[in-house]
Image (cartoon, coloured by chain):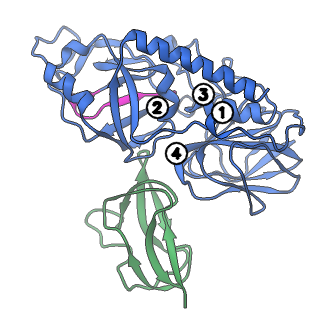
Protein backbone atom coordinates (compact mmCIF):
# COMPACT_ATOMS: atom_id res chain seq x y z
CA UNK A 1 0.00 0.00 0.00
CA UNK A 2 1.21 3.47 -0.83
CA UNK A 3 -0.05 7.01 -0.96
CA UNK A 4 0.96 9.17 -3.90
CA UNK A 5 1.49 12.83 -3.19
CA UNK A 6 -0.20 14.78 -6.00
CA UNK A 7 0.24 18.13 -4.28
CA UNK A 8 2.09 18.77 -1.06
CA UNK A 9 0.02 21.70 0.26
CA UNK A 10 2.17 24.32 2.01
CA UNK A 11 4.41 22.34 4.36
CA UNK A 12 3.35 18.76 4.97
CA UNK A 13 5.59 16.44 6.96
CA UNK A 14 5.55 12.92 8.37
CA UNK A 15 5.31 13.19 12.17
CA UNK A 16 4.87 10.87 15.13
CA UNK A 17 5.13 11.71 18.83
CA UNK A 18 8.78 12.73 18.49
CA UNK A 19 12.30 11.60 19.40
CA UNK A 20 12.98 12.52 23.02
CA UNK A 21 16.42 11.76 24.45
CA UNK A 22 18.71 13.62 22.06
CA UNK A 23 17.95 17.27 22.88
CA UNK A 24 21.18 17.54 24.87
CA UNK A 25 23.00 16.70 21.62
CA UNK A 26 21.13 19.44 19.77
CA UNK A 27 18.60 17.16 18.10
CA UNK A 28 15.14 18.51 18.85
CA UNK A 29 12.31 16.49 20.34
CA UNK A 30 10.42 16.81 17.06
CA UNK A 31 7.07 15.18 16.44
CA UNK A 32 3.59 16.58 15.95
CA UNK A 33 3.07 20.10 17.27
CA UNK A 34 -0.42 19.09 18.40
CA UNK A 35 0.31 15.65 19.76
CA UNK A 36 -3.17 15.26 21.20
CA UNK A 37 -4.66 15.57 17.71
CA UNK A 38 -2.18 13.07 16.25
CA UNK A 39 -2.94 10.59 19.04
CA UNK A 40 -6.69 10.95 18.43
CA UNK A 41 -6.29 10.48 14.66
CA UNK A 42 -4.22 7.33 15.17
CA UNK A 43 -6.61 5.80 17.71
CA UNK A 44 -9.58 6.54 15.42
CA UNK A 45 -8.15 4.40 12.61
CA UNK A 46 -7.00 1.63 14.94
CA UNK A 47 -3.29 2.50 15.07
CA UNK A 48 -1.04 2.79 18.10
CA UNK A 49 -1.24 6.38 19.33
CA UNK A 50 2.38 6.96 18.29
CA UNK A 51 2.15 5.76 14.68
CA UNK A 52 3.44 8.19 12.07
CA UNK A 53 0.88 10.37 10.31
CA UNK A 54 0.98 13.57 8.30
CA UNK A 55 1.01 17.09 9.70
CA UNK A 56 -0.16 19.77 7.25
CA UNK A 57 -0.16 23.45 8.09
CA UNK A 58 -2.75 25.93 6.69
CA UNK A 59 -3.21 24.04 3.39
CA UNK A 60 -3.99 20.36 3.01
CA UNK A 61 -2.15 18.07 0.58
CA UNK A 62 -3.72 16.21 -2.33
CA UNK A 63 -3.16 12.47 -1.90
CA UNK A 64 -4.00 9.53 -4.15
CA UNK A 65 -4.45 6.09 -2.60
CA UNK A 66 -3.18 2.96 -4.40
CA UNK A 67 -5.13 0.64 -2.09
CA UNK A 68 -8.10 0.92 0.26
CA UNK A 69 -7.22 2.69 3.50
CA UNK A 70 -8.91 4.04 6.60
CA UNK A 71 -8.25 7.73 7.28
CA UNK A 72 -8.98 10.17 10.10
CA UNK A 73 -8.32 13.91 10.07
CA UNK A 74 -8.07 15.78 13.36
CA UNK A 75 -6.71 19.05 14.71
CA UNK A 76 -7.65 22.13 12.71
CA UNK A 77 -11.05 22.47 11.07
CA UNK A 78 -10.19 21.86 7.42
CA UNK A 79 -12.80 19.63 5.80
CA UNK A 80 -11.45 16.55 4.00
CA UNK A 81 -12.94 15.38 0.70
CA UNK A 82 -12.74 11.99 -1.00
CA UNK A 83 -13.15 12.39 -4.76
CA UNK A 84 -14.83 15.70 -3.96
CA UNK A 85 -17.25 14.33 -1.34
CA UNK A 86 -16.95 16.02 2.07
CA UNK A 87 -15.98 13.83 5.04
CA UNK A 88 -16.48 14.56 8.75
CA UNK A 89 -13.51 15.53 10.92
CA UNK A 90 -12.39 13.45 13.94
CA UNK A 91 -14.00 10.40 12.24
CA UNK A 92 -12.56 7.32 10.52
CA UNK A 93 -13.58 7.18 6.85
CA UNK A 94 -12.57 4.90 4.01
CA UNK A 95 -10.58 5.96 0.98
CA UNK A 96 -10.72 3.34 -1.78
CA UNK A 97 -7.94 2.43 -4.18
CA UNK A 98 -7.71 5.06 -6.90
CA UNK A 99 -9.54 7.71 -4.91
CA UNK A 100 -8.07 11.09 -4.07
CA UNK A 101 -8.08 12.84 -0.71
CA UNK A 102 -8.19 16.64 -0.85
CA UNK A 103 -8.97 19.43 1.59
CA UNK A 104 -11.13 22.52 1.68
CA UNK A 105 -10.07 25.92 3.01
CA UNK A 106 -8.90 26.08 6.60
CA UNK A 107 -11.78 27.27 8.79
CA UNK A 108 -10.10 27.42 12.17
CA UNK A 109 -6.91 26.19 13.84
CA UNK A 110 -3.66 25.80 11.93
CA UNK A 111 -2.60 22.16 11.57
CA UNK A 112 -4.42 19.02 10.54
CA UNK A 113 -3.25 15.52 11.37
CA UNK A 114 -3.94 12.80 8.84
CA UNK A 115 -3.71 9.25 10.17
CA UNK A 116 -3.92 6.23 7.88
CA UNK A 117 -4.59 2.72 9.13
CA UNK A 118 -1.21 1.01 9.35
CA UNK A 119 0.66 4.31 9.74
CA UNK A 120 3.14 5.98 7.39
CA UNK A 121 5.92 3.41 7.24
CA UNK A 122 9.04 5.48 6.61
CA UNK A 123 12.31 4.27 8.20
CA UNK A 124 12.83 4.97 11.89
CA UNK A 125 15.66 7.44 12.59
CA UNK A 126 16.92 7.79 16.18
CA UNK A 127 13.79 6.11 17.46
CA UNK A 128 11.25 8.18 15.54
CA UNK A 129 9.68 8.65 12.11
CA UNK A 130 9.31 12.41 12.68
CA UNK A 131 10.67 14.72 10.02
CA UNK A 132 13.27 17.25 11.15
CA UNK A 133 13.82 19.13 7.86
CA UNK A 134 16.66 21.37 9.02
CA UNK A 135 18.68 18.32 10.05
CA UNK A 136 17.47 16.28 7.03
CA UNK A 137 16.52 13.62 9.57
CA UNK A 138 13.62 11.15 9.68
CA UNK A 139 10.31 11.35 7.84
CA UNK A 140 10.23 10.95 4.09
CA UNK A 141 13.85 11.46 2.98
CA UNK A 142 14.32 13.97 5.80
CA UNK A 143 12.22 16.64 4.14
CA UNK A 144 8.67 17.97 3.72
CA UNK A 145 6.60 16.11 1.12
CA UNK A 146 6.72 17.06 -2.55
CA UNK A 147 4.55 16.16 -5.53
CA UNK A 148 5.50 12.75 -6.89
CA UNK A 149 6.49 11.24 -3.53
CA UNK A 150 5.13 7.78 -2.77
CA UNK A 151 4.58 7.20 0.92
CA UNK A 152 4.80 3.61 2.16
CA UNK A 153 1.94 2.64 4.46
CA UNK A 154 2.04 -0.20 7.00
CA UNK A 155 -0.48 -2.98 7.17
CA UNK A 156 -3.69 -1.76 8.83
CA UNK A 157 -7.25 -2.77 9.38
CA UNK A 158 -10.38 -1.17 7.93
CA UNK A 159 -12.49 -2.39 10.86
CA UNK A 160 -12.92 0.97 12.57
CA UNK A 161 -14.73 2.65 9.64
CA UNK A 162 -17.25 5.22 10.90
CA UNK A 163 -15.75 5.48 14.37
CA UNK A 164 -16.07 9.07 15.53
CA UNK A 165 -14.80 11.05 18.48
CA UNK A 166 -17.42 12.88 20.54
CA UNK A 167 -17.40 16.66 20.53
CA UNK A 168 -15.99 17.04 24.04
CA UNK A 169 -12.81 15.20 22.99
CA UNK A 170 -12.19 17.45 19.96
CA UNK A 171 -9.68 19.82 21.47
CA UNK A 172 -9.25 23.30 19.98
CA UNK A 173 -7.92 26.55 21.44
CA UNK A 174 -10.51 28.62 23.28
CA UNK A 175 -10.74 32.29 22.34
CA UNK A 176 -9.06 34.38 23.54
CA UNK A 177 -6.13 32.02 23.78
CA UNK A 178 -4.54 31.68 27.20
CA UNK A 179 -1.17 30.02 27.59
CA UNK A 180 -0.10 29.17 31.12
CA UNK A 181 3.50 30.13 31.93
CA UNK A 182 5.79 29.25 34.80
CA UNK A 183 8.31 32.09 35.34
CA UNK A 184 11.84 30.80 34.97
CA UNK A 185 15.42 31.13 36.15
CA UNK A 186 15.93 34.51 34.45
CA UNK A 187 12.68 36.11 35.61
CA UNK A 188 14.68 38.46 37.84
CA UNK A 189 16.36 39.96 34.77
CA UNK A 190 13.30 42.08 33.90
CA UNK A 191 11.88 44.88 36.04
CA UNK A 192 8.83 44.35 38.23
CA UNK A 193 6.82 46.55 35.93
CA UNK A 194 7.83 44.48 32.90
CA UNK A 195 6.94 41.29 34.76
CA UNK A 196 3.44 42.71 35.27
CA UNK A 197 3.15 43.97 31.70
CA UNK A 198 4.14 40.63 30.23
CA UNK A 199 1.11 38.95 31.76
CA UNK A 200 -1.23 41.97 31.45
CA UNK A 201 -0.70 42.68 27.75
CA UNK A 202 -2.49 41.13 24.82
CA UNK A 203 -0.06 39.59 22.36
CA UNK A 204 -0.71 38.48 18.81
CA UNK A 205 0.84 35.55 16.96
CA UNK A 206 3.30 36.91 14.39
CA UNK A 207 3.87 35.58 10.87
CA UNK A 208 7.13 34.06 12.07
CA UNK A 209 5.47 31.06 13.67
CA UNK A 210 6.54 27.57 12.69
CA UNK A 211 7.70 24.22 14.06
CA UNK A 212 10.79 25.79 15.61
CA UNK A 213 9.09 28.57 17.46
CA UNK A 214 6.09 30.83 17.72
CA UNK A 215 6.77 34.56 17.79
CA UNK A 216 4.37 37.05 19.39
CA UNK A 217 3.98 40.80 18.89
CA UNK A 218 2.02 43.68 20.29
CA UNK A 219 2.88 43.72 24.01
CA UNK A 220 5.04 46.34 25.69
CA UNK A 221 8.81 46.03 25.46
CA UNK A 222 10.43 44.41 28.47
CA UNK A 223 12.88 46.53 30.46
CA UNK A 224 15.86 44.85 32.04
CA UNK A 225 17.32 45.28 35.48
CA UNK A 226 20.67 47.02 35.12
CA UNK A 227 23.69 44.85 35.59
CA UNK A 228 27.23 44.45 34.42
CA UNK A 229 26.95 41.73 31.79
CA UNK A 230 28.87 38.62 32.87
CA UNK A 231 31.76 37.37 30.76
CA UNK A 232 30.45 35.60 27.66
CA UNK A 233 26.97 37.09 27.82
CA UNK A 234 27.36 39.73 25.13
CA UNK A 235 26.38 43.38 25.49
CA UNK A 236 22.62 43.25 24.89
CA UNK A 237 20.76 43.07 28.22
CA UNK A 238 18.58 40.25 26.81
CA UNK A 239 21.72 38.15 26.44
CA UNK A 240 22.86 35.60 28.99
CA UNK A 241 25.80 33.25 29.26
CA UNK A 242 24.73 30.40 26.95
CA UNK A 243 22.25 28.07 28.55
CA UNK A 244 19.91 25.19 27.79
CA UNK A 245 16.60 26.08 26.14
CA UNK A 246 13.76 23.90 27.38
CA UNK A 247 10.91 22.89 25.06
CA UNK A 248 8.26 25.55 25.69
CA UNK A 249 10.69 28.19 26.97
CA UNK A 250 9.96 31.79 26.01
CA UNK A 251 12.93 33.85 24.90
CA UNK A 252 12.58 37.57 24.24
CA UNK A 253 15.50 38.81 22.09
CA UNK A 254 16.01 42.51 22.72
CA UNK A 255 13.05 42.44 25.11
CA UNK A 256 10.59 43.01 22.26
CA UNK A 257 8.98 39.89 20.75
CA UNK A 258 8.57 36.72 22.83
CA UNK A 259 9.32 33.45 21.01
CA UNK A 260 8.01 30.16 22.39
CA UNK A 261 10.31 27.32 21.36
CA UNK A 262 8.41 24.33 19.98
CA UNK A 263 9.08 20.82 18.67
CA UNK A 264 11.92 21.61 16.21
CA UNK A 265 13.67 24.24 18.35
CA UNK A 266 17.37 24.64 19.02
CA UNK A 267 18.46 23.27 22.38
CA UNK A 268 20.56 26.10 23.72
CA UNK A 269 21.81 29.62 23.23
CA UNK A 270 22.32 33.03 24.70
CA UNK A 271 18.90 34.66 25.00
CA UNK A 272 17.32 35.02 28.43
CA UNK A 273 13.98 33.29 28.93
CA UNK A 274 11.11 34.80 30.91
CA UNK A 275 9.69 31.36 31.63
CA UNK A 276 8.23 28.24 30.11
CA UNK A 277 4.79 27.42 28.73
CA UNK A 278 3.51 24.45 30.73
CA UNK A 279 3.51 21.12 28.92
CA UNK A 280 -0.29 20.86 29.15
CA UNK A 281 -0.68 23.90 26.86
CA UNK A 282 1.99 23.18 24.23
CA UNK A 283 -0.37 21.33 21.85
CA UNK A 284 -2.64 24.38 21.65
CA UNK A 285 0.16 26.51 20.23
CA UNK A 286 0.30 24.25 17.18
CA UNK A 287 -3.25 25.35 16.35
CA UNK A 288 -2.66 29.11 16.46
CA UNK A 289 -2.86 31.10 13.23
CA UNK A 290 -0.95 34.34 12.77
CA UNK A 291 -2.75 37.35 14.34
CA UNK A 292 -4.45 35.20 17.00
CA UNK A 293 -4.84 37.28 20.21
CA UNK A 294 -3.06 35.52 23.06
CA UNK A 295 -2.50 36.13 26.74
CA UNK A 296 0.15 34.62 28.97
CA UNK A 297 -1.19 33.51 32.35
CA UNK A 298 1.18 33.11 35.30
CA UNK A 299 0.99 29.81 37.17
CA UNK A 300 2.89 28.25 40.06
CA UNK A 301 4.75 24.93 39.91
CA UNK A 302 1.85 23.32 41.83
CA UNK A 303 -0.66 24.58 39.28
CA UNK A 304 1.56 23.41 36.42
CA UNK A 305 1.82 19.93 37.91
CA UNK A 306 -1.94 19.80 38.52
CA UNK A 307 -2.50 20.79 34.86
CA UNK A 308 -0.12 18.03 33.77
CA UNK A 309 -2.06 15.52 35.84
CA UNK A 310 -5.34 16.71 34.32
CA UNK A 311 -3.80 16.40 30.88
CA UNK A 312 -2.72 12.83 31.63
CA UNK A 313 -6.29 12.04 32.72
CA UNK A 314 -7.65 13.58 29.51
CA UNK A 315 -5.34 11.36 27.45
CA UNK A 316 -6.47 8.30 29.42
CA UNK A 317 -10.10 9.29 28.76
CA UNK A 318 -9.29 9.61 25.05
CA UNK A 319 -7.93 6.07 25.04
CA UNK A 320 -11.04 4.79 26.81
CA UNK A 321 -13.32 6.66 24.37
CA UNK A 322 -11.56 5.05 21.39
CA UNK A 323 -10.79 1.64 22.90
CA UNK B 1 -22.07 37.58 -15.55
CA UNK B 2 -21.41 36.36 -12.05
CA UNK B 3 -19.28 37.62 -9.24
CA UNK B 4 -16.39 35.38 -8.22
CA UNK B 5 -14.60 35.67 -4.89
CA UNK B 6 -10.84 35.10 -4.68
CA UNK B 7 -10.06 33.73 -1.22
CA UNK B 8 -6.83 33.52 0.75
CA UNK B 9 -5.47 29.97 0.81
CA UNK B 10 -3.56 30.64 4.04
CA UNK B 11 -3.30 33.18 6.86
CA UNK B 12 -0.56 35.78 7.02
CA UNK B 13 0.05 39.30 5.82
CA UNK B 14 -1.26 40.32 2.42
CA UNK B 15 0.79 42.36 -0.03
CA UNK B 16 -0.51 43.99 -3.18
CA UNK B 17 2.88 44.35 -4.90
CA UNK B 18 5.97 42.15 -5.39
CA UNK B 19 8.18 44.60 -3.42
CA UNK B 20 7.62 47.87 -1.54
CA UNK B 21 8.77 50.02 -4.47
CA UNK B 22 7.06 48.06 -7.22
CA UNK B 23 3.60 48.82 -8.59
CA UNK B 24 0.67 46.65 -7.47
CA UNK B 25 0.15 43.35 -9.29
CA UNK B 26 -3.40 44.46 -10.11
CA UNK B 27 -5.47 47.55 -9.45
CA UNK B 28 -9.24 47.83 -9.11
CA UNK B 29 -10.88 47.53 -12.51
CA UNK B 30 -8.15 45.38 -14.10
CA UNK B 31 -8.98 42.21 -16.00
CA UNK B 32 -7.38 39.03 -14.67
CA UNK B 33 -6.48 35.65 -16.14
CA UNK B 34 -6.61 32.53 -14.02
CA UNK B 35 -2.83 32.23 -13.70
CA UNK B 36 -2.23 35.91 -12.89
CA UNK B 37 -0.69 36.72 -9.54
CA UNK B 38 -2.86 39.20 -7.65
CA UNK B 39 -0.84 39.42 -4.45
CA UNK B 40 1.51 37.80 -1.96
CA UNK B 41 0.88 36.31 1.46
CA UNK B 42 3.74 36.24 3.93
CA UNK B 43 3.69 33.53 6.55
CA UNK B 44 6.31 31.35 8.27
CA UNK B 45 9.14 33.51 6.89
CA UNK B 46 8.19 32.91 3.25
CA UNK B 47 6.12 34.69 0.61
CA UNK B 48 3.47 32.81 -1.35
CA UNK B 49 1.94 34.06 -4.59
CA UNK B 50 -1.83 34.15 -4.76
CA UNK B 51 -3.20 33.59 -8.25
CA UNK B 52 -6.62 34.72 -9.43
CA UNK B 53 -7.76 31.16 -10.12
CA UNK B 54 -10.38 32.45 -12.56
CA UNK B 55 -10.58 34.46 -15.77
CA UNK B 56 -12.52 37.65 -15.24
CA UNK B 57 -12.68 41.38 -15.44
CA UNK B 58 -13.05 44.36 -13.15
CA UNK B 59 -11.22 43.01 -10.13
CA UNK B 60 -12.08 44.79 -6.87
CA UNK B 61 -9.84 44.39 -3.82
CA UNK B 62 -11.46 44.11 -0.40
CA UNK B 63 -8.29 44.63 1.62
CA UNK B 64 -5.28 46.87 1.54
CA UNK B 65 -1.58 46.32 1.28
CA UNK B 66 0.08 44.82 4.40
CA UNK B 67 -3.23 43.92 6.01
CA UNK B 68 -3.44 40.80 8.17
CA UNK B 69 -5.44 38.07 6.50
CA UNK B 70 -7.04 34.84 7.69
CA UNK B 71 -7.30 31.65 5.63
CA UNK B 72 -10.48 31.64 3.54
CA UNK B 73 -10.93 35.42 3.77
CA UNK B 74 -12.06 37.10 0.54
CA UNK B 75 -9.18 39.07 -1.00
CA UNK B 76 -10.95 40.38 -4.07
CA UNK B 77 -13.99 39.97 -6.29
CA UNK B 78 -13.98 39.64 -10.06
CA UNK B 79 -16.72 39.50 -12.66
CA UNK B 80 -16.32 36.09 -14.22
Question: Which badge, 4 or 2, is on the more N-terminal residue?
Answer: 4
Magenta stretch in the rendered image: A252-264
**Image side of residue A208 versus residue A97, left or right:** left
Distance (Cα) linking label 1 and label 4: 14 Å
- The C terminus of chain A lies in quadrant: top right
**Image side of residue A256 versus residue B76, left or right:** left
The answer to whether tags 1 and 4 share a subunit is: yes
Distance (Cα) linking label 3 and label 1: 9 Å
Q: Residues within 10 Å of mark 2 (few under 14, many from 20)?
A: many
Residue B10's tag is none
In what element is the residue under mark 2?
A: loop
Question: Which badge, 2 or 3, is on the more N-terminal residue?
Answer: 3
Chain letter for mark 4: A
In the rendered image, residue B50 lying in the magenta stretch gets the answer no
In what element is the residue under mark 4?
A: strand
Q: A164 or A148, which lies in front?
A: A164
Residue drawn where x is 66% and y is 28% of the image: A16
Q: Colour of chain A?
A: blue
Question: Which badge, 3 or 1, is on the more N-terminal residue?
Answer: 3
Does residue A5 sit above or below B14 in this rendering? above
Q: Which residue is mark 4?
A: A109
Q: Which residue is mark 2?
A: A212
Residue A31's tag is 3
Q: Nearer the viewer, mark 4 or mark 2?
A: 4
Does residue B12 sit above or below A163 in this rendering? below
Residue drawn where x is 50% and y is 71% of the image: B6
Percent position (x, y) of residue A131? Answer: 62, 32
Percent position (x, y) of residue A262? Answer: 47, 28
Q: Colour of chain B?
A: green
Chain letter for mark 2: A
Q: Which residue is mark 1?
A: A38
Amino acid sequence: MAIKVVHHGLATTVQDLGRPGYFHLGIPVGGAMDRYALRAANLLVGNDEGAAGLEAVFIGPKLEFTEDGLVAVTGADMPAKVDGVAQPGWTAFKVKAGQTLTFDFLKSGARIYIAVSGGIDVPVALGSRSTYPIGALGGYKGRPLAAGDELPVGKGSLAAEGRSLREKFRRAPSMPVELRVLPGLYWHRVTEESQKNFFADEWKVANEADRMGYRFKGGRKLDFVEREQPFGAGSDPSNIVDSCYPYGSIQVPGGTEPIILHRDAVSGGGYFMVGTVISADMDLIGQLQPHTPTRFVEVTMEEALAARKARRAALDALHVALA
Amino acid sequence: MSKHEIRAPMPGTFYRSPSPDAPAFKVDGDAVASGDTIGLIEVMKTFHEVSAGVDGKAIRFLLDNEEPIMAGQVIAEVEA
